[in-house]
Structures are given as C-alpha cells and as structure tokens.
Image (cartoon, coloured by chain):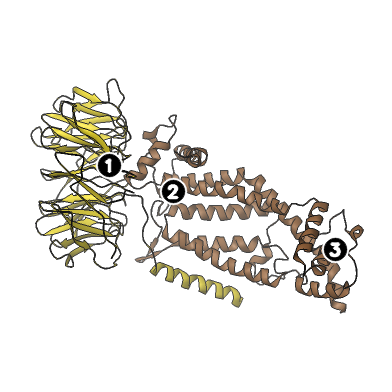
Amino acid sequence: MNIWELIFIQPMTNILLLITMLVKNFGIAIILFTLLIKLLTMPLTAKMVKSRKEMAELQNDPHYKKIMAKYKDDREKLAMEQQRMYKEKGISPFSSCLPMFLQFPIMIALYQSIMRVMASTPVELLKLERIVYPFLDINKIIPVQNRFLWMDLGQPERLNVLGIGIPVLAILVVITTWLQSKAMEGPDANADPSAAAATGSMNKIMPLFMGYIAYQFSAGLALYFVTSNLTTMLQYALMGELNWKSLIPWAKKDEPAPTNKVVETTLAEEYEDEEVDEEAVPQSPKPSARSAARKMRPKKMKK
Amino acid sequence: MNKKYLKVIILSLLSLILLAGCATGPRAESTTGLAANESHLFVSLANKIYKVELETGLEIWRYPSDNSRMMVYAPVLLNDEYFTYGDLYNTLQRVNLETPTQKVWEFKEAKGWYQTKVAESDGVIVAPNTDRNVYGVNAKDGTLLWTHEDKFAFLAEPVIVDGKAIISSQNHEILWLDLKTGKPEEKSFAMKGAVISAPYYDETLGYIFVGSLGHEFVAIDAKTQKEVWRYEGSILKLSGIWAPPIMLQGQLIFNDDLGNIISVDPKTGAENWIIAEQGKMLAGLAAIGEDAFIVALEDGTIRGFDVNRKPLFPEFDIPKGKIYTTPLVTDEMFIIAPMGAEFLVYAYPIEYTGMTKWVYKPAKK
C-alpha cells in the first residue's frame, strides 16, 4: 500500500464503510460522508472565501487601480508594486488558492473511496477487502448494498420512463454544477470582460463535463457530485457569499462596476504624470468592492 | 426565458446526446479470461476475444475484427460449434466458432455486466449478472426463459447438476435453481460470508465444495443441500476463499487469499496438510496431471507442488506481472495470463525447464 492509500484512501474508505454499516444504506452513506467531509473542510473553504473577498476588494481599491494603470506596460514594476500593496494590506494572493489546493486531495480521495467501496468485480472486491481495518467485520460489510431509490449505485444511472432510460442524476449534476458556479460568482464578476468571458465559458463547459462523467460512470459518483454541489452552495449561503441574483435571470442586478479597461484608460490619462502617492493608500477600514466601484464611477461618467 | 439561458440549456441537451453517442464504455478493473478446447486457447481481454493456436501460440483470429463496441473479461463458454460469452455492455451472445463474423444470437435484457463464464445444460444457458439477476436463456435462439433476482451482483460461474443450477451468491448463500423454470429450492444453503468463488461439484461423492469470504470452506450434499462438513482452519485461521478447489489423488486442495494451501479429505473434511502463507493470492490452484498443481501468486510468482507438498520445480516469476486468473492447464502445458506483464499470455511446458513454450501478445492492427 502506498502513502496516498495509507493516509487518505484507507481511512476514508473505512469511515464510509462504517457509516454504511450504521445507516445500512450506501446511498445515504455517500450523502452523509460527503456532508461530513464538507463540514471538516469548512474552515478551509471559509479561509478561501475570505481571501477571495479581500483580493476582490483590493482590485477595486482606487490606489491599486492607479498602480495597475500606471505600470500597465512595465510588468516587472507592476509586480513589485502589487507585492508591496499585498504586504501593506496583509493579503497573501496565494491564501485564496492554498485552501483550494488542500481540498483537492481530500476530494480526490473521497471520490476514490466511493469508487473503492462500489467494487463490482472480484479484483475490486479483493482490493476493498484488503484495506478494511481489522476492527470492522468484513463479513458484515462486503458486499455493500448498492441499491438506492431506483438506482444501482455501481452502474451508470438511468430512470426508465416508458422504455426510455433517462439519466436523471447526470442531468441533476449538470444543473447543480451550473447553479453552483453561477451562485458563487461575485457581484462584480463581470467587471473584466475577458475574465467574464472566460468564467462564462467555464460555467458552460464544466457542468457539461461533470454531467458527462456522471452519465458514463457509476450512479454513486453522480450522487456524490450532486451532494457536493448542493453542500458547497449551502456553505457559501451560510457564509453570506451566495449570489442568488446570478441565478435568477430576470432579477434586477447590481449595476456593474466599471470595467478595468475603462478605468485603466481613464486613470492612465488622469494620472499620466502623477507619481503614486504611497501615503494615500487607505489602510483602515478597507473599502468594499462596491464602494470602491462607486467612487470610481463618477469620474468615468464625467469624462 | 432569457435567451442566454435557453441557449445554455439547448447546448447542454445537445452535448448530452452527443456524448451519449460517443460513450467510451463501461469501466471496471477486471482480469483476463481464459478458456481452451483441444486445439485452441481463447483469451478474453477488454475489447477483444483472441483465438490462439495452442501448439504454437499464433493468433488465428480476433473477435470482433472491427472496432465494434465490446468489453469482455469473462472466459468464453465453448462447444463444438459456438462460443458464448457475456460482456460489460450487458450483452450475452453466441457466435460461430469457425467464422466469428456470424453472430447466432444476442441477449440484451440484462441491465448489468457479465463478469463470469456462463454455464449450459439441456438447451439452457445460465448467465449470472451484476444486475442481481441470474438469467436462464434458450441456447438455440437467445430468448429469455426465466430470471431469478437476488440482493447482490452475481460474480461466480454456476455449476449445473441434475437439472439444477447451483450458484454462489454474495448474499451469503448458495442457491439451487431449477434449470427449466429458474425457481429456487425452498431452502438455500447459508454461508458465513459473501460467496465469490464458483462451487465445485464432485460426481463420485455427490458433494458441492465451496468457500466464502467468511473464513470457511464447506462440503454440501448436492441433492439434499445439507452440510456434510465444514472447515474453518486448524493452526491457521482460514482467510477469504476466492477460487474453487481441485481434486487430486483423493485429496481436496484449496487456497485462501493469503496463499494458505490446504489439503483435506473430501469425505470428512479432515486436514491432510497445509502449506502456509505462500503470498497474496486471488487465482485458484490449477491441477497438473493427476498428482500435482500450480500455484500462481498475485505478485507474479509461480510455484508447483505435488500432492505430498514436494516442489515440482524451482519457483519463478513473471516480471511486472500481477496474476488474478487461475492458470489454465492442457495435456502439454500450463498457461498463465498475468496483468501488466510484457506479454498477455505465457505458456510453459508441463515438464517445466525454465523456458516458455511460447508467449503471446496481440499485435497492433
């Protein structure tokens, strides 16, 4: 057994099996296990959200924008100035990525554990048997009952309606992945047109990709995807970071902040010869993204 | 509805349809299936069945010859005219042996995978499936005769005795199904763990021998379904049993997944001897002639013993090979199909000299 299996797969598989033993239903066990993992990784998610928020606020900071505009043609200097600002404001640009990277192995291990428990060939069963801890009675665990509602969790899911197999879970995966990505968009997600275009493409491609995986692979995995998506949305909602308005096409949206390009051009002209006043960097309280946007707007309009 | 959202929904639906058409197939970690008749070896692996000449190791044909959808690991069932197999696309089919382009019939009513070899008797094919059903299929035309539903996937090859299909169930039992109707006997035989191994029938004694993951090996009277004896270990506690036993010189010999090899008296279950902990082992023992057997360990090590535990030859191994399939033995050779090794099949002469008789690897076409 390699280190990855020893540290991640074996404990997680055993917890999943233990939950299955307790609730006597593998479908419910997948849901509970996903919730448990999401709960345990909540501090990481919260840290990631906080860092992302700080970064968003910084990007709407007038002084930051001035720097961006001023050094737009000097990448080296721009990077130095950005670093200086991060330091002054106590922001680590990597702290928004780090929790995400820390969550990756956990999520991969979660996926692998679910796949491991859904063993459907003798070789897969043998491999499952070998990683079960001795205190769990293997005979009470194997085989795991894969039936949940109308699904066989070990097989790709189809709901048979009038002879047509409808991939309900795959469709749910597409919908929830899309909802999740839309709901987690910040209010000023469309501030930069190129970033907005990239996000828009991702928001379309990712749900389809995940749906494809759910369509092709076992229903247990699709169930995990749906649970994970809904739980992530719940987490963001609890942290007050869910942008419900993104989900409702007809809802009145906040007026978008001016695009960086316009700001850059405007500021570049305005501060063409002006040195950046380092004293002028607001320290506390930090302006919110929206207030920063509001501060910028009149200047652009006047022009 | 906002046009943008309508566009995304239409795009999603179109993509789903497109992706459904481009489906790459089921995924399962499984192992090579081996079967042979007097002159040829049939190797089932992934998207092909290969027919190989036993004498030379030369490929005769591969089925299907085109890129038709198929995923098969179960050994084929052979008779003089046809080969029959089930695949991971939920299809059971019978194909002409000499002209493998001629499909005799297809049975597509199962919703799960065929992981194991099917059995045939009196015009009925008994096909266990992972969709928790055993299917009784008419061998002539592939029509469904009966279905028996259970709680878990069926993974083991059935044995047919006196009009009854005897089947290992993961639901901790051995089932007796009527071959013509699929109706189960009122009482099944309860085991302590999931039964993955196929039952072994001894005609002389009229007993079924089978082990389970519940650290037990039992002899059951095939007619009365009553326990004759039970073996759970002596000095060593028995581990999980994944393969059927062999019968040599009046000894019943079987192995567990830790590589303990146990010989017992088939009438009483009294222990004759043990060869302890050879190594991790999923494959079963393969009898060579009337008084010896081959042990193929998971790590690629091959050993041979006679019924008195005397080694037949110095052990050897297949580099990088993982062995999960029970070796196949013919009059002249023993054949190993490891996973991950340089070749797909290794054939060694019965009188092992340290050399292979031939090796086979499908050429890229």
Q: Residues within 10 Å of mark 3 (few under 14, many from 20)?
A: some
The residue sitting at 57% across, 55% down in the picture is A229
Q: How many marks?
A: 3
The residue that label 1 is drawn on is B169
The answer to whether B352 appears left or right of A8 in the picture is left
Task: Tell me the distance, in whole angstroms, between the alpha carbons under discs 1 and 3.
Answer: 72 Å
Depicted A66 relative to depicted A119: above or below = below
Q: Earlier in the sequence, mark 3 or mark 2?
A: 3
Contact between marks 1 and 3 (CB within 8 A): the answer is no
The residue type indicated by label 1 comes to Ser
Kind of residue sitting beneath label 3: His
> Given this view, does label 3 or label 2 mark the residue nearer the observer?
3
Position of the C terminus of chain B, as image quadrant, is bottom left
The residue tagged 3 is: A63
Q: Quadrant of residue A268?
A: bottom right
Give the x, y percent position of residue A74.
77, 67
Q: Residues within 10 Å of mark 1 (few under 14, many from 20)?
A: many
Nearer-the-camera pick, B174 or A128: A128
Disc 3 to disc 2, C-alpha distance = 50 Å
Q: What's the chain of the residue with tag 2? A: A
Q: Amino acid at mark 2?
A: Met
Task: Give chain A's shade.
Answer: brown
Q: Secondary structure at mark 3?
A: helix
* Secondary structure at numbered mark 1: strand
Q: Colour of chain B?
A: yellow
> Within the image, what quadrant is residue A292 found in?
bottom right
The correct choice, above or below, for A72 with respect to A135 in the image is below
Camera sees residue A102 = yes
Report the residue marked by disc 2: A115
